[in-house]
Image (spheres, rainbow, N blue to C red):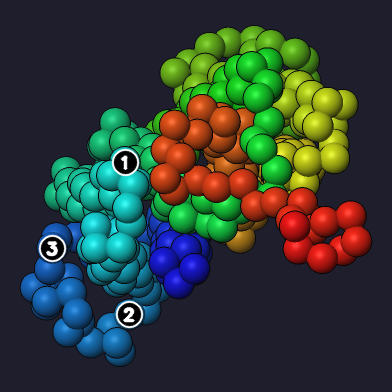
Amino acid sequence: MWLHRYAKLVSAATVLLIVAGGLVTSTGSGLSVPDWPTSYGWNMFTFPMKHMVGGIFYEHGHRLIASGVGFLTILLALWLWRAEPRRWVRVLGFAALGAVCLQGLLGGITVLYFLPTAVSTAHAGLAQIFFGLTIAIALFTSRGWTHPDHPPVDDRALRMVATTTTAFVYCQILIGATMRHSDAGLAIPDFPLVFGGVFPPAWTPQIAIHYAHRVGALIVMLAIAATVGHVCYHHYTRRELRRPALTLACLVLAQVTLGAFVIWSQKHVAINTAHVVVGALTLATSLVLTLRSHHVRFLDNRASIHVRRPVEAHMGPSGAHA
């Protein structure tokens, strides 16, 4: 259980890192510290706190938090290697470690090459993959996964719709990252209309990516509605599916609302950052639901997954142990 709790700590720290990254982008602070891996020639960890003002506070703070998450991930990978009996979970730990190292390298490249859109978008996309890995590890090490109260649901339709939804959410995040890093967040300045209509009267690359993000949001909403509807209709009594499904419904409504307020507030820093964070939480929740829909397919690992049976199953007719 301590390994599971530590994995949840790493996931929570990653959320904090996503908040910090969102603040860097929302405040336009990506080049406030123009060198890497040093900070104005200082070692990252000895940079004077008195100089952390303005954009430097956001950018350098982001680097420090990223270093902390990297250290936590090293410990997680080593702990999994020493204590986790399932080889594939141990491999996930080192995959997360590799992802966070590559993430740091991409972050450095974005600074050294003055925020190229492609690299910045890759940096954002890999951040979501790393977050997903930490969420998956926390789920796979939980007691609910290794010792479920009931046999996992075997529903091929649920697996298909949940997996598709998670893929759509991730693609939508990539489109949003491209929009954000190409400065297209206000390319269409009104909402819910598009220049007072349904389609843009003229097209530019920025308008196209912004419009694609809006269309993607509609597709994601429909996919989530299908997933949540399937769970509520067929598996409402299964708490392990119902909870993430209902949470996913709430998150996507909050995300659409935040997206509208990003436009209406002219990209207010707090709202823009919250939009980034809720997007990541939406992906994580969809991933949890998807993995739980596939739980039955992991049962080949019977040495590490056992169904907990009620006490009554071991009791005789008189109440004594059989």
> Real-space Cα distance between discs 1 and 2?
42 Å
* First reached walking from the N terminus: tag 2 or tag 3: 3
Give the residue pinned by disc 2. 52
Label 1: element kind: helix
- In this rendering, which labeled residue sits more in front, label 1 or label 2? 1
Q: Residue at x 51, y 28 (%)?
A: 297
- In this rendering, which labeled residue sits more in front, label 2 or label 3? 3
Q: Residue at x 37, y 78 (%)?
A: 53
Place of residue 153 in the rendered image (x, y in percent of width and height, measured from the top left)? 68, 31
Place of residue 113 in the rendered image (x, y in percent of width and height, measured from the top left)? 16, 43
Place of residue 309 in the rendered image (x, y in percent of width and height, measured from the top left)? 70, 51
| Amino acid type at image mark 1 | Trp
Using the image as rendered, state which of residue 120 and residue 51 is in the foreground: 120
* First reached walking from the N terminus: tag 1 or tag 2: 2
Q: Residues within 10 Å of mark 2 (few under 14, many from 20)?
A: some
* First reached walking from the N terminus: tag 3 or tag 1: 3
Give the residue pinned by disc 3. 37
> Real-space Cα distance between discs 3 and 1?
33 Å
Q: Visible in this render: residue 27?
A: no
| Amino acid type at image mark 3 | Pro
Q: Residues within 10 Å of mark 3 (few under 14, many from 20)?
A: some
Give the residue pinned by disc 1. 88
Q: Quadrant of the C terminus?
A: bottom right
